[in-house]
Amino acid sequence: MDTFECAFCQKTFPVDPFHTFCPECQEPLLCKVPKSDKKFHHDKDSPLEIMLDFLPLDQVDQDLSLGEGNTPLLRLKNVEKNFQLPSLYAKNETVNPSLSFKDRGTALATQKAISLGIERIGTVSTGNMAISTAAYGAKAGLETYVLIKEGAYREILNSTGIYDPVMIIVKGDYGELFRRSLSLGKEKNIYFANSVDPFRIEGYKVTSLEIFFQLNQKVPDFIFSPVSSGGHLIGLIKAFQELQQHGFITKLPHFVGVQAEGCSPIAKAFQQNKPSVERMAKAETIANAISNPDPPGGNLLLRMIRQAGGIIMSTPDEKILEAQRILSELEGIFVQPASATTLAGLLKLTDQGKIDQESRIILILTGHGMKGLDKIALKDTHIMHSDIADLESILESVPSD
Amino acid sequence: MDTFECAFCQKTFPVDPFHTFCPECQEPLLCKVPKSDKKFHHDKDSPLEIMLDFLPLDQVDQDLSLGEGNTPLLRLKNVEKNFQLPSLYAKNETVNPSLSFKDRGTALATQKAISLGIERIGTVSTGNMAISTAAYGAKAGLETYVLIKEGAYREILNSTGIYDPVMIIVKGDYGELFRRSLSLGKEKNIYFANSVDPFRIEGYKVTSLEIFFQLNQKVPDFIFSPVSSGGHLIGLIKAFQELQQHGFITKLPHFVGVQAEGCSPIAKAFQQNKPSVERMAKAETIANAISNPDPPGGNLLLRMIRQAGGIIMSTPDEKILEAQRILSELEGIFVQPASATTLAGLLKLTDQGKIDQESRIILILTGHGMKGLDKIALKDTHIMHSDIADLESILESVPSD
């Protein structure tokens, strides 16, 4: 039977979407899926069905799916060539249905909610997770509650509101709101699938499993992922650990979590070799999708990344924006600034001589650039104006690159 | 050997991206792919490779791909139930890499350009095609020219400009710009892959072929698609015609092209049983992705839809916006207004008793709602404001649906 487990005190608890933190350690619980003799069901079409033995689901209800996952793994040869990098791939999570990796977690949380007879779902978010939860809640016919921190961009409100959830814009500390949502959820029977929800994390595992098969069952040497609350990278690591436990692989990738310098509490704790993460007074970064100054999965991620032999690092905003441009101009992939931290982190480690030239490297691109469009500065681009009669001379005036 | 053919005078021409209209009839040429004994290569991963025998390509260069295609076919059971509809599916083209169906066509045009040694590519667009061409041009390392009609939204400029193409904002008549781009392209060696480009149309065929296999080699009864220039639906029809010619199927789907009432020149010609399309003086619709008053593929589409036994209809803006809301609120899918014309059209035909209850119906959803966000009115949504202390009472005040 599936259980929840605390990675700190090792206690186990019954699976319960309303009790997702260890009552003693105050750390997020993780799912333990005991099915033995795990197989992959490649005769199935959907990622959740293919990976079912690794997930805390008895079956998959396709009527709840928006077609999440099965995202492309793209070779980035132009970036390789320009920066003398080894084999580099992007796992393009931006083409999930609501345009971010959050759909992986929301899909699993929604499956679980329906299978348990839950009627109300919620989340606390600054953006991507609000949109994703509103979309899946609509599809599943759940009453959906989205708590959004005051100050969110209009594009977040519009693209969440289109699904018609209950949307509450909340003033106050984000970490406090996170904790309050969980206690209110218990009282009001609203399952708050927040950033480090155990089922959400199980959904993120599927991304790693897809990468493993897209590389013909080879283990990449490095996986770079943006880090905010910690939940996403926890899921990515957990999947490879489970592949190892069940004998599919013998070694783990090196995981590199990248934060934006202006909001890098986990990277700070990692670099200073501290046992736990200290919250930052404020977050100041253009990468608003990863601007959580009080990450609820910080301590758990620190623990897992140290066990797995990875690192958590940070990169400044100007390098993030530079990396965003590199990905669009050289590879035709337009990502949110948060996703561009992965390439910025790789370029930094490359400069430091830490990347072996024989490596196979994966960047996890988490959210589409269309969600963050207001921040694109067009000043560098070639924009010209013309009428039809002058078009010929305008074309002749274009400098050859 | 592949050739170009005019559907009107039946003349054939050598394949040439710089001569894509019949010099006599002035109508768009179509590709003829003579490979006999066509097979599907299901052992391959990418849609272009799987469908290669049906496409005017000798091979597929994966380094030019952004992972286009292989999009979900989603059952819309909530809409079925609410509107007493037969089996209804959405082909979700909004999760293509640049978030619209245009990527299918651009992917094929780019493959062709590189295989022919072409170094400069271009397009004339009001939105989706500009973004798509800029993205694929960047990936392929082509010099990319995007001609955008004056008045395009800032979000179009930003999301095209991020790939750093040569972007020229042009004043003047859109139809004239379309024709001028083709003549200038010949002079300046820029391959303008515009809306009815023969290779672009070949790329759209892949969508139909995917649907055929996603339905386990069954033919849907109806396929609804938005119509602007005509190119997309021409490709969708052509694929099923070829499946029939090569003995894979015995009957065709009923194709329903839907235009916005404020810009419906092809629907008008169809309803009035005219042999050719008359341009409209102006386009007035919220569905700007399909607001071409002078559609270059109009006459060809009319001809094909009459042969295939389909119809071209129109629907007013208020029904389009209503359908957009239905898709997001009931099915968790957020589309551009243009895509919502498909559901609006289906509901209209259902009201008229023209849809058999045993039918299997496909809606082609062409572009993601994130590209058109400014037009979302939030007035209907449940938005509340709170601080953390008052959250409990705010939650209690939410009316149950």
Image (tube, coloured by chain):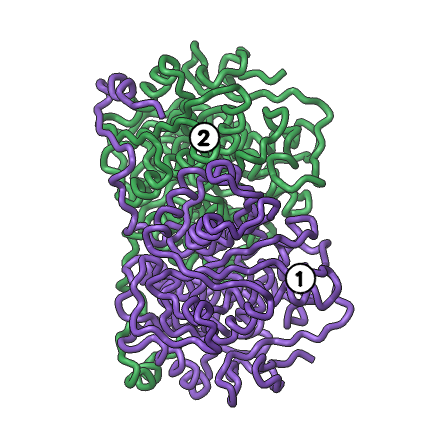
Chain colours: A purple, B green
Say which quarter of the image contains residue B87.
bottom right
User: Residue A227, how many percent across, how many down?
Assistant: 45, 63
Which percent across, then down, holds residue A286?
A: 31, 57
**Residue denoted by label 1:** A51
- Say above or below: A261 vs A142: above
The amino acid type, in three-letter code, at marker 1 is: Met
Which quadrant of the rendered structure holds the C terminus of chain A?
top left
Q: The disc numbered 1 marks a residue on which chain?
A: A
Inter-mark Cα distance, 1 to 2: 37 Å
Q: Is residue A296 visible?
A: yes
Q: Residue at x 41, y 29 (%)?
A: B195
In the image, what residue type sits under mark 2?
Answer: Gly
* Left or right: B262, with A234 as reference point: left
**Number of other residues with Cα within 10 Å of mark 1, as a class: few under 14, some 14 to 19, many 20 or more:** some
Pointer 1 and pointer 2: residues touching (CB < 8 Å)? no
Image quarter in which the N terminus of chain A is found: bottom right
Residue depicted at 47% across the width and 35% down the height? B139
Q: Nearer the viewer, mark 1 or mark 2?
A: 2
Q: Who is closer to the viewer here, A221 or A7?
A: A221
